[in-house]
Image (tube, helix red, strand yellow):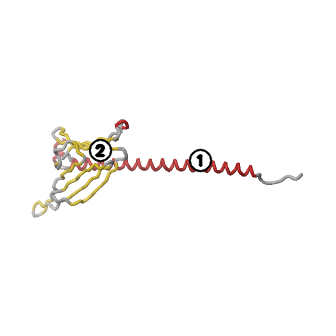
């Protein structure tokens, strides 16, 4: 009797099935890792957007002289009038900047858009994404002689809220870089 060398058909099917199962597991894990990486990147981008919004909103409110729509206590749009910048020259004080500078924040679904205008001409626009399922609201209130402007970002679903709300408060015309702000801060 002679012995055959090689593999039987059953052995080949078992090896191919094992290879297919291992390949399927590897592809499933790779897809899960790519989804997790995408969700992590979206979360970091949303956090960076909210950080930029927080800084820009506070700077704008602190630098603003008045609120154009100040009669509203709760709204989804607020327009801040920025002060006129004047430059001293040899001939006296001149104003090369437009006195009608304004910044407007508009809440549009799950995003906040910032429009910067000079003499009613759009100079700049920035969009801050809040994330799906989040809403925002603006409110104004008096606080220690100043007007306090609040931007509240919270989940739309009350059951989800927990303590995942973000409240940005800023006092109108409280820019410490200006002489008036420094005197009041002392």
Q: From the viewer's perspective, is residue 80 above or below residue 145?
A: below
Which x, y percent locates residue 152? 28, 42
Instruction: Name the residue rendered at 56%, 48% in the picture.
Output: 28
Instruction: Name the residue rendered at 19%, 40% in the picture.
Output: 141
Q: Nearer the viewer, residue 66 or 88?
A: 66
Residue that mark 2 sits on: 136
Give residue 98's quadrant in the image: bottom left
Q: From the viewer's perspective, is residue 99 above or below residue 153?
A: below
Give the left or right position of residue 14, taking residue 31 as reference: right
Give the left or right position of residue 173, taking residue 129 as reference: left
Q: Helix, strand or loop at disc 1?
A: helix
Q: Helix, strand or loop at disc 2?
A: strand
Instruction: Name the residue rendered at 27%, 53% in the picture.
Output: 114
Q: Residue 25, which numbered label? A: 1
Q: Nearer the viewer, residue 178 or 55?
A: 55
Query: Which quadrant would the C terminus be assigned to in this image?
Result: top left
Which x, y percent locates residue 105? 25, 50
Cα separation, mark 1 vs mark 2, equals 42 Å
Callout 1 environment at 10 Å: few (<14), some (14 to 19), or many (20+)? few
Which x, y percent locates residue 54? 30, 47
Tell me how many marks there are: 2
N-terminal-most mark, 1 or 2 = 1
Which x, y percent locates residue 137? 27, 43
Q: Residue 102, which numbered label? A: none
């Amino acid at each position: 009797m002679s012995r055959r060398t090689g593999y039987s058909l059953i052995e080949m099917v078992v090896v191919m099935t094992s290879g297919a199962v291992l390949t399927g597991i590897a592809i499933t894990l790779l897809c899960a890792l790519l989804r997790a990486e995408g969700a992590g990147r979206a979360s970091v981008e949303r956090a960076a957007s909210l950080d930029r919004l927080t800084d820009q909103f506070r700077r704008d409110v602190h630098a603003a002289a008045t609120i154009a729509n100040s009669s509203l206590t709760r709204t989804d749009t607020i327009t801040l009038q920025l002060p006129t910048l004047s430059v001293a020259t040899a001939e006296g004080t001149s104003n090369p900047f437009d006195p009608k500078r304004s910044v407007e924040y508009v809440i549009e679904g799950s995003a906040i858009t910032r429009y910067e205008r000079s003499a009613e001409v759009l100079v700049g626009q920035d969009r801050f994404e809040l994330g799906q399922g989040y809403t925002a609201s603006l409110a104004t209130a008096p606080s220690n002689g100043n007007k306090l402007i609040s931007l509240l970002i919270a989940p739309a679903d009350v059951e989800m809220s927990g303590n995942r709300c973000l409240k940005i408060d800023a006092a109108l015309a409280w820019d410490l870089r200006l002489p008036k702000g420094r005197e009041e801060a002392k």
